[in-house]
Image: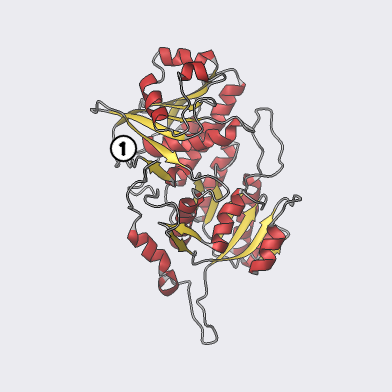
Amino acid sequence: MSVPPTRLRRRDLLKLGSMAAMAPWFSLRADETKPKLPRVAAINSIYRLRSHAYHIAGRFIHGYTINGLHHQPPFQLVRMFNHQQPADDLGPEVCKKHGIELCSSVAQALGGDKLDVDAVLLIIEHGDYPLNERNQIQYPRFEMFQEVIDVFRKSGRSVPVFVDKHLSFDHQKAAKMVAASKELKFGLMAGSSLPVTWRIPELAPPLSTPFEEGVAVIGYDRNTWEIYLFHVLEVLQCMLERRPGGETGVKSIQTLSGEAVWKAGDEGRWSWPLLEHALSRCPSRNYGRVREQAKNPLVTLIEYADGTKGAVFNLVEATSDFAFAGRIKGQAEPVSTCFYLPAPPGARFFDPLTFNIEKFFDSGRPSYPVERTLLTTTICDHAIRSQHNGGKIITDPSLLIRYQALEDDGHFRGRFIDRS
């Protein structure tokens, strides 16, 4: 697999590398020998090996690799709250070793009514939580978020909050989270690592790219489909959002399964050539014809308000990679790429995500609009509802979310392994 050329923005590296000297919240007193770093609290569902908290909060503690070189975030993780403590819980050990206060509540982790931290990580992924009737994991992201903003209200101030993955399994709760951030005027950023990980081959459509159709693909058969459905929706959306005029929202959603998937392709509701282009970028692609490989195919069909067509696939037997292909008006050949995810245990796709979180915590401005995550969250919820209702077409005002993508999408280029 070839590696795209190094293009990580030098000004971003320099900015984060010199924050101790430049940022107003850094200070040196006469009795100090080290700069006072911005203070971060981590609110986690669980902290164990390979959990999202292990990968994100852990990078704030230990540092990580950027362009093959070690980078230590110029922040101090001061407190941690873990909602669950399983037998393999690493929280007490990690906190004791690194001088982090292990807290018994969300409010305590934020410093109580005084709110003495400068940013909040909300990482509610993994752990033992119930499923609802639609097989969605009922992660308490919304409930934990509410506890965070309760502290904001009592303290009379607020700080940037990053929410890992989708905002909630319930789109109505997700909309309330975004509304609260606007009411209290604090930066809110959320989402998957997929939009900011490496792309092979490199693909960065400029703003106003006239996409007419796009597809994204993954193959996933562990646990519930919602987990990876959100990720593949993020793959699709981070590309199609760059259409002229920005994102105007979605008109309808429908999730099909089995033979109905192939029938929809034959009828032109999604593009066979685009699916083949996307699969062609997958290093894990299986041999043979996808129609014969996939035993239980799934597709979510997305009709955008401006007429653009989208489709995301789960094709377990065909691939285990994330890939995108899109058709651009006036171009004969589609564009396509694989969203590269270095494997666990290191899972270095958390490097670009953590770097973008750092930029957000430094500036208070998200690396990409939270409305994108609200839209992918809402599509994900309605797609699962459609699947639960036998492929019902869903139209709902909650899908009509507008926003403008940023020129710099924040994704990494260059090395993803250490320099020798």
Residue 239, x across and y down, in percent: 38, 37
The structure residue drawn at horizontal position 53% and vertical position 53%, both measured from the top left corner, is 162
Give the quarter of the figure containing the N terminus. top left
Residue extending farthest bottom = 30
Q: Residues within 10 Å of mark 1 (few under 14, many from 20)?
A: some
Give the image quarter of residue 289. top left
73 sits left or right of 201 in the view: right
Give the quarter of the figure containing the C terminus. bottom left
Give the image quarter of residue 304. top left
Its colouring scheme is secondary structure
The structure residue drawn at horizontal position 37% and vertical position 47%, both measured from the top left corner, is 409
Residue 35, x across and y down, in percent: 50, 76
Task: Say above or below: 328 vs 265.
Answer: below
Residue 381, x across and y down, in percent: 56, 32
Kind of residue at disc 1: Gly
Give the labeled residue for mark 1.
Answer: 245
The structure residue drawn at horizontal position 61% and vertical position 52%, both measured from the top left corner, is 53
Residue 44, x across and y down, in percent: 64, 52
Task: Say above or below: 367 vs 41.
Answer: above
The structure residue drawn at horizontal position 40% and vertical position 72%, both measured from the top left corner, is 22
